[in-house]
Amino acid sequence: MSFSPYLCKSKLRELAAGAGFCGFGIACADVVDPVFASVRRRWIESGMNAGMDYLARYDDVRSDVRLMVEGARSVIVLAMSYYDPSALPGVSVARYALGDDYHDVLRRLCVPIAGVLESEGFAARICVDTAPVAERYWAVKAGVGVIGLNSTLIVKDAGSFCFLCEIVTDAPLPPDSPAQGDCGRCGRCVKACPAGALNGDNTLDARRCLSYLTIEHRGNFPPGTDLHGCLYGCDRCQEVCPHNVSPAVTPRSEFMMRPDYAALSLDQVIELDQNGFSTIFARSAIKRAKLAGLVRNALTLKDVGK
């Protein structure tokens, strides 16, 4: 039987919905818009990527997704809510990290979707945050959402408490219309950022961002650093966003808050050894901060509270 692009797209959308994805869209694989590429390069050149040197690598691939898969013709963009309304952690941990590591969960959920394409003889590369893909750009092109002033993607009818992942394929799938407009630009996120990291132009300065400092930054903090109560990550800009007044609730138990986190205190974090850290945060994105980083964060918060 010959390949039917529209029937295939319908099957892919059905599988995505069945897995719990709240956003699904397809864009034609192509070179990214020169204006977008230029803004990104200026952002890197200004040093706003802080210590995330990996963001400056593979600029050719970030500018042309077709370099990821030979003959790539389509980019499938998927969004998954991680919002758990019952999550009230005892310490400040970003909502995305309260459950299992999204890299593993999303990749597993994408395998059957990619499998449909592979069964038709097409290549399908799953990308979950670790590949050099301009994912928010492609999410807009695929009609999944718009980029907010705080640089997060606001998914249509779901809000911004969402993970993104992509499947790059050489299958000729019917594209969706790009998302139109902007977030509304009310500026609440810019005003709410305790560290003044938001530039007001859909970009942020990672050197000031509390998420970067508590997760990616290695070593001592710059003098005078105030973590504003954040142990791991920061959700302030998302919490005040009008699009998150009633965000989509995650359908996946993997992203629900782990019970142990509710009672986790700064003293307990400070006293952790490597074995305890590995046990408590097994299969957790919090491992990215490493034991030294998490203890450093807790000690900094403890000093402020004295």
Image: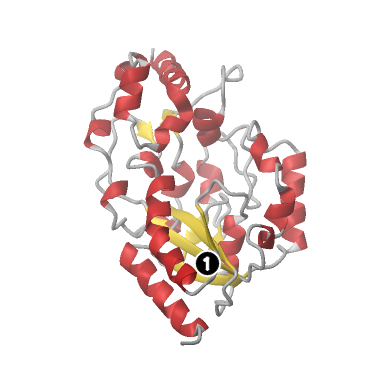
Q: Position of residue 95 (x, y in %)?
A: 37, 43
Three-letter code for the amino acid on which mark 1 is drawn: Ile
Q: Position of residue 139 (x, y in %)?
A: 55, 63
Q: Is residue 181 visible?
A: no
Dot 1: few (<14), some (14–19), or many (≥20) neighbours within 10 Å?
many
**Is 171 placed above or below 54 here?**
below
Q: Which residue is mark 1?
A: 76
Q: Residue at x 55, y 22 (%)?
A: 225
Q: Quadrant of the C terminus?
A: top left
Relative depth, front residue between 48 and 190 = 48
Q: Residue at x 49, y 85 (%)?
A: 4
Give the quadrant of residue 184.
bottom right
Total labels: the figure holds 1
Give the quadrant of residue 113.
bottom left
Q: Position of residue 120 (x, y in %)?
A: 48, 75
Give the quadrant of residue 111.
bottom left
